[in-house]
Image: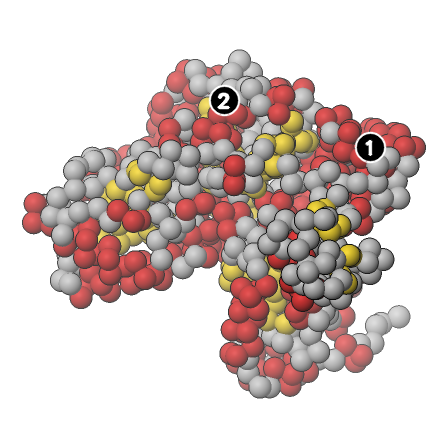
Amino acid sequence: MKLNDTAALNALKTESLTLLENRRIANPLTTMDAQGKPRHIMVCGGTGCHASDSPEIAKLLKEELDRRGLSDQVEVLQTGCFGFCEKGPILEIHPDNTLYVDVSTSDVADIVEEHFVQGKQLERLLYIDPNTEQRFAADLPFYHNQLRIALRNCSYIAPENIREYIAADGYQALAKVLFTMTPDSVIEEIKKSGLRGRGGGGFPTGVKWELTRQGEAKQRYIICNADEGDPGAFMDRSILEGDPHSVLEAMLIAGSAIGSTHGFIYIRAEYPLAIHRLEIAITQAREYGLLGKKILGSDFCFDVEIKYGAGAFVCGEETALIHSIEGARGEPSVKPPFPAQEGLWGKPTCVNNVETFANITSIILRGADWFSNIGTEKSKGTKVFALAGKVNNVGLVEIPMGTTLRQIIFDIGGGIKHHKTFKAAQTGGPSGGCIPTKYLDTPIDYESLISIGSMMGSGGLIVMDDSDCMVNIAKFFLEFTVDESCGRCTACRVGTKRLHEILTKITEGKGTLDDLDSLEKLSKIIKDTSLCGLGQSAPNPILSTLEYFRDEYLAHIVDKSCPAGVCKSLLRYKITDKCKGCTLCTKHCPANCISGSVKEPHVIDEERCLKCGACMEKCRFGAIIRH
Amino acid sequence: MSNNSLIKDPYQLLDDYIDSLPYKKENLILILHHAQGLFGYLPDKVQWHIAQKLDIPSAKVYGVVSFYSFFTMKPRGQHVANVCMGTACFVRGSEKLQQEIESQLGIKTGQTTEDHLFSLDSVRCIGACGLAPVITVDGKVHGRLENTEDIKQVFAKYRSEATPDAQSEISSVEPIQDVKHAT
């Protein structure tokens, strides 16, 4: 079915609205008979829930509903990510305003029986707040302080059906741009909104579009950067899985504003589900005449091609990404010329991140003023963070800029796991830094994060508690950059390796105080002399931990101890006089290095000890200590 | 490897694929993805073949293959296990998990077991951070692997499903020593 004009699009929207009708309302749960329209079970189909068998749950639900003769009254749909990954698989039932968490295949029969036949909530699958022990069927505290713009459709619509997207105002922004706005006014609107690149750099999106539009060129290209490489960040993937059309629509808008007819989506090959959903979306958009020639009956032509990454972190850098699309090694090149002047195959190219694109349609439809009212003075709108690590509610959260770390970690994230103590939050992935407790109340935006030695990055937010060793964390990130440095700049190629060696030395208890100076000096050189963002920011994890957690470095170097008990070479296990001589530890020691007679205190032979900690775990009297 | 590729010459299949592409040199990475799907890995001979077919220097093909971690020049086992080394998994114990798997399989990361059943690698964040620490085996995610028993079960499952001729299937791929470089 081809949509030849705005009227056809609007007619399809009106027709499709019934699909979403009962998702906009929240009724109290009643029995089947009282319902007119079919109810919807939205089963989370994000990668996390997918991995915990959500497709199987959806299949079993369908079968069970069929068996009970309810299949015409209840529809089962797969959505994108709900964001609340900690409690996955998740399913939400419309219009009953009910969210079930931690669902497994064995719960299917009970859900159908209790919820749909008897018409009452299945209490045991409701979310229980770990802090207050209160049960929630809807309106979970996790969602309270969030504002979903980029993630607005994730979990709300079924991403594999273009009609659901159209019913949710999909492609209306494109129609508005094509028929009521000029390219200049589109760019002006995006500039006015204050939207900045969500991939990490924070460059104003409208300015980038304007620069790409300037100058003579026969062809210009739009690239969507979906090479999400920061370990611990997965918002781009979730957007592509949950709302692929919003990205396609934004690319179309960018294409019409900049004067481009061809777009590329550069995506990691490690994201098979996102690729699959994107392929479906592209096929559907072509069928409806929303990609291809004369879109919606206008003169605008635009098509999109998917390009696969092959596992190189540096390809997130725009010039490296462009080389990779051209089929070459993904090494960055010197800027200027910027891609906006000379990009893909020498043509002006606009590279935007997935999350940046996901904001565009809302800005066009609701206006730049609406958008710029959200956020801080210099950072407008919202940011999606992938909250992970030692926090109760791991998941995707979208918050207005200016929200504090404390609100994210403690209000939305539900605090630290196992009631431990917060130690640091790491943002910005391998390019970012570790933020200590004293900055928990800093309102988050691009500038504030840089001023405290970290950066926004693509939005990974890893929470660490007192059992994480900060020297080891710095070493972890350096290991990453050593691996991922493309090798072009000597400072980055050789320098990061030396940094990693020094950190290894320190974690093994062989460090000296001079090493700290070397770390700082070398870090500065690498920052100053590397070509691209990877090298320029690679030392950040070291510099920030050196600044805020210097005492931990000193403990490793001077006291030869690891306060968090992580660095194995520095651990000592000792049996205290609490030992009752039960001999349990000797049975579990893999090195057979514990000796002693029954009912008498035992001794560990430190020379042979593997430092595995098995004895300490097994001791029932707490007689074994680690120091 | 699909049965199809065993019946038809994989080089022929690769050529057919390349012929079907509108652009060729620009699609080198796509072609390499496809070739790795056909052969299981990218030995010199396959790289050489692609270079000739695309009329580009084999050094360029090698440059690309060696740059991207997704491509491998060594044959892999029947099942490829990847330990996620993303930060979220790291702070939830992926280092320990990796060591445990290494000791259970008796190989180091980057190696393949002698029976060619498993290859072990690491991967940077697959985005299933809610399930940390996770591994993937042939792309399927196994999460919350916090104790030895759970890990054993994952591999036992694949072992019980293994075809007895895993060894012979792997050795049917073109041997690397056949390669003769043009001078």
- Residue appearing at x 76%, y 25% in the figure: A547
State the CA–CA distance, disc 1 to disc 2.
Answer: 34 Å
- Residue appearing at x 52%, y 60% in the figure: B142
- Residue appearing at x 60%, y 86% in the figure: B165
Relative depth, front residue between A532 and A400: A400
Chain under disc 2: A
Q: In this view, does A214 lie above or below A415?
A: above
Q: Quadrant for residue B15, please give it.
A: bottom right
Chain under disc 1: A
The circle on residue A554 is: 1
Mark 1 is on which residue type? Leu
The circle on residue A112 is: none
Left or right placement of residue A446 versus residue B59 in this view: left
Q: Position of residue A287 (x, y in %)?
A: 34, 51
Q: Where is residue A459 in the image (x, y as percent from the top left)?
A: 56, 34
- Pointers 1 and 2 in contact (C-beta within 8 Å): no
Q: In this view, does B71 lie above or below A570?
A: below
The circle on residue A403 is: 2
Mark 2 is on which residue type? Thr
Q: Quadrant for residue B88, please give it.
A: top right
Q: Where is residue A62 in the image (x, y as percent from the top left)?
A: 25, 61
The answer to whether marks 1 and 2 sit on the same chain is: yes
Mark 1 neighbour density, 10 Å: few (under 14) some (14–19) many (20 or more): some
Q: Residue B162: tell me if it is visible.
A: yes
- Residue appearing at x 73%, y 51% in the figure: A575
Relative depth, front residue between A487 and A217: A487
For label 1, the SS is: helix
Q: Residue A349: tell me if it is visible.
A: no
